[in-house]
Amino acid sequence: MSKNQVSRRQFLSYTLTGVGGFMAAGMLMPMVRFAVDPVLQAKAESDFIPTPQKVSEITEVPTRVDFKFEQQDAWYTSEVTGTAWVYLDDKGEIVALSPVCKHLGCVVDWNTDKANPDKFYCPCHGGLYTKDGTNVPGTPPVAPLDVYPYKEKDGFLYLGKAKPKKEA
């Protein structure tokens, strides 16, 4: 037998400390995983979302393009539908505008106001935007429509997150 004998009190203390340590680790591991797991998950390859719009079919007339993407809020994933107005400008470059009015967030539509043809019209308060998304002075909107950055991949249009239009 060993010279250093463990007393009952020491044995009980070591045993309870060990069991308590295992219980604490069992409670802390899920919390640590919850905090660290989102950081370790792989991110999406790109911030650009595919649309069903073929680039070859884009014309000079603004066309409404609806696209779907998955949005994750914490642990809940939902499918969201986005919209853009897409057309070719005078230089033949693609322009993709957000349909959200800068006045109160209503959705604008192209060429629906008979009194103001060839303009984006907001039905909520009569807001008007020119074809390039610039707000018409004297109407409620105080800023131009946001612009989607875009890229072409495999003949289809991909849209990024809408950004405020840079004033010329």
Image (cartoon, rainbow, N blue to C red):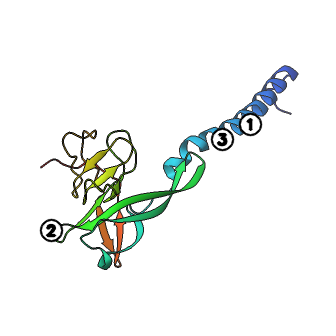
Expressed as whole percent of the image width and height from the top left, the position of residue 2 reads 82, 32
In the picture provided, is 96 more to the left or to the right than 20? Answer: left
In the picture provided, is 155 more to the left or to the right than 33? Answer: left
Residue type at mark 1 is Phe
Expressed as whole percent of the image width and height from the top left, the position of residue 156 reads 36, 74
Residue located farthest toward the top when viewing the structure as drawn: 9
- Alpha carbon of mark 1 to alpha carbon of mark 2: how far? 70 Å
- Identified at 75% across, 34% down, the residue is 23
Residue type at mark 3 is Met
Is residue 136 in view from this perspective?
yes
Residue 105, quarter of the rendered image: top left
Residue type at mark 2 is Asp
In the picture provided, is 152 more to the left or to the right than 41? Answer: left
Closest to the camera, between mark 1 and mark 2, is: 2
Expressed as whole percent of the image width and height from the top left, the position of residue 139 reads 25, 41
As drawn, the label of residue 29 is 3
In the picture provided, is 47 more to the left or to the right than 79? Answer: left
Expressed as whole percent of the image width and height from the top left, the position of residue 101 reads 34, 46
The first of marks 2 and 3 along the sequence is 3
Which residue matches tag 1?
22
The first of marks 1 and 2 along the sequence is 1
Which residue matches tag 2?
90
- Identified at 39% across, 43% down, the residue is 124
- Identified at 27% across, 48% down, the residue is 128
Out of 154 and 64, give the one closest to the viewer. Answer: 64
Is residue 13 depicted above or below 123 in this figure?
above
